[in-house]
Image (cartoon, grey):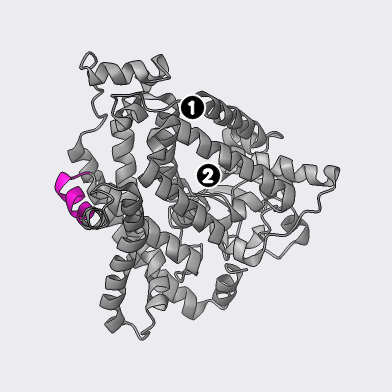
């Protein structure tokens, strides 16, 4: 696929260089964000109604967890960090940051350990525990509370820290977008490699990246805000490009740092849980150990907290220990942690394929409820009608054989990209003198 420079084409160019992009889109999405908080507030699962059914029927949970979340997974893998460009919480954080000088709060730099992603890892883990233990994704009130907490955190991070601190250090999906979006077809990149450094252009990046070197280092951290593209309009050195996915011109070191490694391990457990849910036998096999632990501890066979700990901590540790021990005879290292770090990003390609398969399945099974939710936003009448068999539940938009076929194709593609990426990594390490600085810059 030949590179297409979207910022040079007439229709997208008018958007890219529009004075109010992306702020206007962010403001619109912020209005929707606040409306969802308000509408879901105080709404719980009605008595006698299955909570999963009510989640599909209620407009808040349907839009957030049934449509936005799987769409963002697909978009991250295919189009990179496009969501970051229009995220409403980035706007909230930026506005809060601009207020610090007016109210006399001295802004602080984001510390090294915060930049590494430890807080993001913690918040993602907490969210997964709340989904497992409290069914946050099925109760509108809990979803509203979660959205409100994220809104407040974005304000606080903007008030007390600078340089897009919320996006860089606290966004609960920051690591997911960084890992999944590192090979996206849509990207902000220099017009050609080898351009000389420009301090003025670097100062336009509020994420503290060097735009000229985005194809050589830290491209997976670019939020695609287009600040550098808009600031360099006359020179045209920075472009919004549509390229072949997993572009060969980008350097992507395969050695992950610890927050990214632990995040991938955590997601492997969550995705395994999600995929096993497509089959009753696989679901029973995955839940066998936590159900027996719950019975032994006197907490019941379906305790959500035990299932959450099993899904994002115990099962991933067991799985990755087995994988590490299997790989150990084929590598020189006997350090299990080092093996995990070297395996993390290649294995994440398999995880992405599985996660995308689940995303397609969720869009298929939840998408049919959208017309009903638009007619009955609260969802109670719809859920009761289906429970009492007065209404027929919407059919899946796509059959399971199609979903499984898509999943098989995604797995084949993931294996191909994994093999190719490993070869590119080896070539970069041995041939490119800039490779070392790429690895160093990712930890800055």
Element at label 2: helix
Range of magenta residues: 278-288
> Which percent across, then down, holds residue 250?
51, 62
Is residue 126 something that shows in the picture?
Answer: yes
Is residue 227 something that shows in the picture?
Answer: no
Q: Relative to 144, say whether 254 is above or below.
A: below
Q: Nearer the viewer, mark 2 or mark 1?
A: 1
Q: Which residue is mark 2?
A: 82
Q: Where on the picture, by quarter, is residue 267? A: bottom left
Tell which of 226 and 337 is nearer to you.
337
Question: Residue at (61%, 34%) from the top-left corner?
Answer: 26
Is residue 287 located in the magenta-colored stretch of the structure?
yes
Check the picture and name the quadrant holding the C terminus. bottom right
Left or right of 248, for residue 21: right
> Which percent across, then down, holds residue 38?
55, 25
In the image, farthest residue toward the front? 298
Contact (Cβ within 8 Å) of mark 2 with mark 1: no
Q: Which residue is mark 1?
A: 40
Count of number-bearing discs: 2
User: How dense is the environment of label 1, judged by Cα within 10 Å: few (below 14), some, or many (20 and up)?
Assistant: many
> Which percent across, then down, holds residue 235?
72, 51
Tell which of 64 and 142 is nearer to you.
142
Magenta: predominant secondary structure element? helix
Q: Relative to 266, say whether 92 is above or below.
A: above
Is residue 113 located in the magenta-colored stretch of the structure?
no
Tell which of 326 and 75 is nearer to you.
326
How far separated are the C-alphas under marks 2 and 1? 27 Å
Question: Residue at (51%, 23%) from the top-left corner?
Answer: 39
């Amino acid at each position: 696929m030949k590179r297409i420079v979207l910022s040079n084409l007439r229709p997208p160019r008018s958007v890219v260089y529009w004075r109010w992009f992306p702020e206007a889109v962010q403001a619109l999405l912020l209005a929707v964000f606040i409306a969802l908080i308000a509408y879901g507030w105080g709404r719980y699962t009605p008595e006698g109604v299955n909570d999963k059914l009510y989640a599909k029927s209620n407009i808040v949970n349907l839009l957030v967890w049934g449509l936005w979340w799987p769409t963002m997974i697909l978009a991250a893998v295919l189009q990179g960090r496009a969501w970051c460009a229009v995220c409403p919480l980035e706007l909230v954080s930026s506005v809060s940051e601009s207020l610090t000088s007016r109210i006399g709060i001295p802004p602080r730099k984001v510390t090294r350990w915060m930049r590494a992603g430890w807080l993001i890892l913690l918040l993602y883990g907490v969210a997964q525990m709340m989904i497992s233990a409290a069914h946050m994704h099925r109760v509108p009130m809990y979803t509203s509370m979660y959205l409100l907490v994220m809104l407040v955190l974005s304000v606080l991070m903007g008030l007390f820290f600078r340089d897009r601190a919320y996006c860089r250090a606290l966004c609960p999906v920051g690591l997911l977008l960084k890992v999944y979006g590192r090979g996206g077809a849509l990207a902000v990149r220099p017009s050609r490699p080898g351009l000389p450094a420009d301090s003025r252009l670097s100062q336009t990046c509020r994420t503290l990246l060097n735009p000229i070197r985005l194809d050589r280092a830290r491209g997976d951290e670019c939020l695609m805000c287009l600040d550098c593209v808009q600031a360099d309009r006359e020179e045209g050195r920075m472009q919004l490009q549509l390229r072949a996915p997993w572009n060969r011109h980008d350097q992507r070191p395969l050695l992950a740092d610890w927050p990214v490694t632990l995040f991938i391990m955590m997601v492997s457990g969550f995705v395994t849980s999600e995929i096993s849910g497509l089959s009753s036998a696989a679901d029973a096999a995955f839940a066998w150990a936590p159900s027996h632990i719950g019975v032994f501890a006197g907490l019941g066979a379906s305790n959500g907290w035990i299932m959450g700990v099993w899904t994002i901590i115990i099962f991933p540790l067991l799985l990755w220990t087995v994988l590490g021990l299997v790989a150990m005879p084929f590598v020189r290292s006997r350090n299990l942690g080092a093996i995990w770090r070297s395996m993390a990003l290649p294995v994440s390609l398999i995880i992405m394929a599985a996660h995308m398969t689940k995303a397609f399945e969720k869009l298929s099974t939840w998408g049919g409820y959208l017309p009903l939710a638009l007619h009955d936003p609260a969802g109670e009448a719809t859920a009761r009608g289906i429970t009492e068999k007065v209404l027929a539940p919407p059919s899946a938009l796509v059959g399971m054989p199609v979903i499984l076929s898509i999943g098989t194709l995604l797995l084949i593609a993931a294996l191909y990209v994994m093999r190719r990426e490993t070869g590119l990594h080896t070539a970069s390490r041995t041939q490119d003198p800039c490779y070392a600085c790429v690895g160093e810059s990712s930890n800055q």
